Every structure is written in C-alpha cells, then in structure tokens.
C-alpha cells in the first residue's frame, strides 16, 4: 500500500492499493458513513435535439461518495464501494443519485472518516510495511511461466511458448532459443522493482542460460538471482515452486512462509484431534471474542461463498485487537486450497475452548 498522505486528526488518508492484500485492508478500513473520493466513469445522458433517450455518454469523472456498502469480488481483484454522490467534477451528474466505484490495484483513492482510530492507523501501518517480492520463473525448452509473489498472493504474469518441441535429442530440428529467453527477460523487466528477488527454476542448461541472461541485463543486474533444479514449467511450475523446500529457505522471512507454517500447524492439530484450532467463520468468531486466536489464515475465495463480510471483518478486527495475527492467502496456491477446504478460514488458538 502506498500512503501519500495521512492526517489522522482530520481523518484523511490518500492511498494507492497495490495488491489484493491492500484491497482487503481497504475493505476493513472503510465503513458506512465514510467519504471516498476517486476517479471513475459514469454514463451521462444529456438532452438535445439529436440525442437518443436510450443512449448515454460514458465519461471520466472524479466523484466523492458517502459510503453505504463495500464488497470484495470473489477473486479479491476489485473492491466495490457503493454510496450517495456528494460531489462530482461533471456538472451534468446529479448529486441526488448513487454510484458504485470499483477500486483495483494501482488506483488512487482518498478516504475521509469522521473519526480516525488507532486501529485504522495500525491497519495502514501493517499494509505499508515493506514486503520482499519474488519474481518466479519456471522454465524448460518448451514453455516458461513467470509469476510475481507478493506477500501470500501469486499473480501469473505470463506464459511463453518457445516454439521448440521434444527434448532436443538427435534428429530434433535446432531452434534459436535466444528470442524465447529474451521474451522472458522482457516480462521480468516490466514488473521488476529495486529489491526484488528473481528465482529461476528448471532443468539443466535451460535454467543456467536463463540465469545468465538475467544477470547480464542492465536493468536486472541488481537483482538477487537464485537458481534451482526443477521439473515443472509454465504457470503450474510457478505455483508449485513456492512449495519447494529450497525456495522456502530463501523466503524464510516472508509472509508466505509464515502463512505456510500456520496452515501446516493447523493441519497437524486437526489430524491429532487437538482443540487448539478453529475453522469456519462462526467458530473463529467465537474464538476471537474469547481472545483465544493467535494466528488466523483466510483464503481469498471465502468471498465467493457468500460469506457475511461484515461479520468476517468484525471477527478479524477483533483478532488483531486482542494481539492475534491475520493473513489472507491466495486460493490458487496449495496452502490456500487447504484453507478453502476448511470453510475458508482456520485459526490457531492459544488455548482450548
């Protein structure tokens, strides 16, 4: 999360969500009655001699909304904010109406609250904490997958086909692989930031060639580059790479590993029949009220199951108020699928309930 302005005494924050985790932070930060200012688009119907009554012009406007409802879509890729229009940069848009603003990563909004609480500040502080990013490449002679891991969320940036076939043995037509490798490097450069770690995984000479090109590129030469032997490629290879023990050692201080350890511990406790674990919203909410939750992991697809978002936000805020930690995990990853199978959320408890 990029916070360009924060004035708690005035209840104002200007920020940009950069990831699904940031959208989840916004979902917890916003409440009915708050004001949100954002760029959006709206159909404006203007009367005139040559204007069809059923047609309108979609225009870009800046709108201030008094928030009435907030929902995350099922993939946590967008946040929908619904409310009454207070101000608009376009005089033809009536202030008597209502509107919905869709917030996606990369979009700037301004939030105004009547009362800015210490809990609100803690939410933004945790969202702006620096989290190391990993650019993951799973590559063989035929296909490459490139992904970006931020926190515990994975984005597949691209899959690239080399045009080669087979394993390059005797009788196989030789293909110039340099354009293939350059395409992968171009994808990395498009998303790379200072401090990112590039992880290249693949068989034999393929990964070594890829590593060499990354290290020689002037825009990527400052990257920390790690190379691992690996048998999978493409998007499946990228997702599988995060489970690889060698990668987990490299990312040992990351949120991803902390989440994986929490999920592994929850599965162990369940398999042993321990009571220091809770899953599904009603049970986790009960544990949160008792102050028993140490760590709680929520799968992002919990929103696809028509969960009571207000109850979820209340329970997770309570966890943090009482000293627990809350994580959201990508449901496309193996650990996310495990949490989804437990009703979308699982919590490690400090003591039996």
Image (spheres, grey):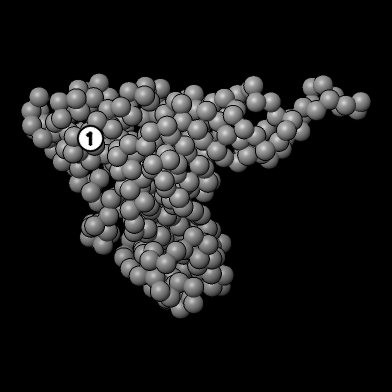
Q: Position of residue 46 (x, y in %)?
A: 80, 28
Give the class, few, some or many, for how many residues have Cα within 10 Å of label 1's Cα (few <14, many ≥20).
Answer: some
Q: Height in image: 286 above or below 328?
A: above
- The residue furthest right is 49
Residue displayed at 70% across by 29% down: 93
Residue 195 visible at all: yes
Relative to 28, 109 lies left or right: right
State which quadrant residue 58 falls in. Answer: top right
Q: Height in image: 219 above or below 120?
A: below
Residue 184 visible at all: no
**Which residue is denoted by mark 1 in the rendering?**
321
Residue displayed at 82% across by 21% down: 53
Q: Position of residue 141 (x, y in %)?
A: 46, 64
Which is more toward the observer, 291 or 220? 291
Which is more toward the observer, 118 or 343? 118
Residue displayed at 47% across by 39% down: 111
Q: Secondary structure at mark 1?
A: helix
Relative to 42, 222 lies left or right: left
């Amino acid at each position: 999360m990029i916070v360009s302005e924060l004035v708690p005494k005035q209840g104002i924050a200007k920020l940009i969500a950069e990831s699904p985790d940031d959208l989840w932070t916004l979902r917890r930060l916003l409440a009915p009655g708050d004001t949100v200012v954002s760029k959006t688009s709206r159909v404006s119907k203007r009367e005139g001699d040559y204007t069809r009554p059923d047609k309108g012009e979609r225009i870009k406007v800046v709108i201030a909304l008094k928030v009435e409802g907030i929902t995350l879509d099922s993939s946590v890729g967008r946040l929908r904010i619904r409310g009454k229009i207070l101000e608009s940069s376009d005089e033809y848009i009536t202030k008597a109406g209502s509107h919905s603003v869709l917030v996606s990563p990369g979009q700037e909004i301004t939030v105004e609250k009547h009362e800015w609480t210490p809990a609100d500040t803690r939410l933004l502080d945790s969202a702006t904490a620096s989290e190391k990013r990993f650019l993951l490449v799973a590559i063989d002679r035929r296909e490459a997958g490139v992904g970006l891991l931020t926190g515990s969320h994975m984005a597949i940036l691209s899959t690239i086909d080399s045009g080669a076939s087979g394993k390059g043995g005797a009788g196989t037509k030789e293909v110039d692989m340099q354009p293939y490798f350059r395409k992968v490097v171009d994808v990395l450069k498009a998303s790379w930031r200072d401090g990112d770690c590039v992880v290249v995984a693949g068989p034999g000479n393929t990964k070594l060639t890829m590593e060499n090109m990354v290290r020689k590129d002037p825009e990527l030469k400052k990257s920390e580059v790690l190379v691992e032997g690996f048998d999978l490629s493409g998007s499946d290879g990228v997702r599988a790479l995060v489970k690889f023990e060698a990668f987990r050692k490299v990312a040992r201080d990351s949120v991803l590993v902390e989440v994986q350890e929490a999920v592994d511990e929850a599965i162990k406790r369940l398999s042993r029949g321990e009571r220091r674990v809770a899953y599904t919203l009603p049970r986790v909410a009960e544990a949160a009220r008792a102050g028993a939750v140490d760590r709680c992991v929520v799968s992002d697809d919990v929103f696809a199951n028509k969960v009571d978002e207000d109850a979820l936000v209340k329970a997770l805020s309570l966890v943090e108020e009482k000293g627990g930690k809350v994580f959201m995990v990508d449901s496309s990853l193996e650990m996310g699928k495990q949490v989804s199978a437990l009703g979308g959320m699982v919590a490690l408890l400090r003591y039996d309930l």
